[in-house]
Amino acid sequence: MDRDAQIKMMKQHVGIEAARLVEDGAVVGLGTGSTAVFMIEELGRRVRSEGLRIVGIPTSYDAAVRARSQGIPVRTLDDVERIDIAIDGADEVDPMKCLIKGRGAAHTREKIIDALAKVFVVVVDESKLVDRLGTTCPVPVEVLPMAIAPVMRRLRDLGGTPVLRMGVKKDGPVITDQGNMVVDVTFDEIDDPAGMERTLNNIPGVVENGLFVGVATIILVGQLNMDGAISVRRIE
Ligand code: 5RP
């Protein structure tokens, strides 16, 4: 099995394991991304075959479409007073359970919903664990389109290298579910993720950034064992 196939298997295991944590009657934040898809599919299976009664609060149009196709009832934040559990992927996880999210440009809604949840379960494969955030991926920053130029200047002043995210199979920039653009910012080092999260969000024109500090409750990590079997490690 090649590495891509192994990673897909790890994502599948961890997504299914996370879906098993959801209890009857729960309001569930539904994450975005290829790992979250496995969780949504397993929840759908449980709804259809076990009669699990849940309400899903999707973190993106993509999660909403996938949840509906699985028979999971979908609601908005206007309809619920609590979120019992949110399950979502991440691009990097550090030893303090701080995250970088937003490869799918969904980090603004993800942060709102994941932060509201009583329990936020992060589902990742082992390749996402890093000693220091920013090692393998940039920090996505969602920006109002009219503020792109000054925000990019400010990001350079902060020592970052900002790149406007461009569409795939779409000419021009990526447009988020909120109608904004995304700037991916590479920093040499992120020594203080909490400070950086605040600094980025203080730039006028920035809607939200992909640093998630103090939000995650549990990290479930899909890992490949020496014997070739895949297991799920839980970090609390
Ligand atoms: C989307 C996200 C995703 O959760 C994150 O990119 C992880 O994705 P995947 O499970 O496909 O690796 O933050 O905005």
Image: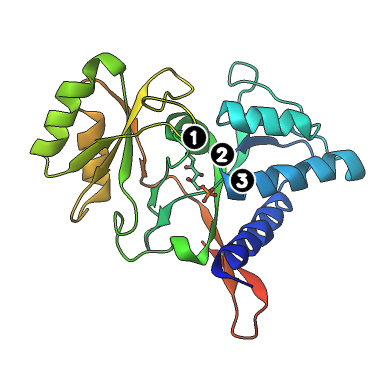
Residue underneath mark 1 = 110
Residue 200 image offset from top left, x and y in percent: 23, 34
Note whether ligand 1 is within 8 Å of mark 1. yes
Q: Alpha-carbon distance for marks 2 and 1?
A: 8 Å
Are the residues tagged 2 and 1 within 8 Å (C-beta)? yes
Disc nearer the start of the sequence (1/3): 3
> Do the numbered discs 3 and 2 sit on residues whose CB atoms are within 8 Å?
yes
Which circle's residue, 2 or 1, is located before the other in the chain? Answer: 2
Q: Nearer the viewer, mark 2 or mark 1?
A: 2
Q: Residue sitting at 55 percent across and 38 percent down?
A: 117
* Relative side of 124 to 149, left or right: right
Is the distance from the Cβ of mark 3 to the nearest ligand 1 atom less than 8 Å? yes
Q: Nearer the viewer, residue 137 or 220?
A: 137
Q: Quadrant of residue 93?
A: bottom left
Q: Pointer 2: what residue?
A: 32
For the residues marked 1 and 3, what is the alpha-carbon distance in whole angstroms? 12 Å
Q: Residue at x 43, y 63 (%)?
A: 129
Report the amino acid beneath label 1. Glu
Query: Which mark, residue 36?
Result: 3
Residue at image point 68% right, 47% down: 39
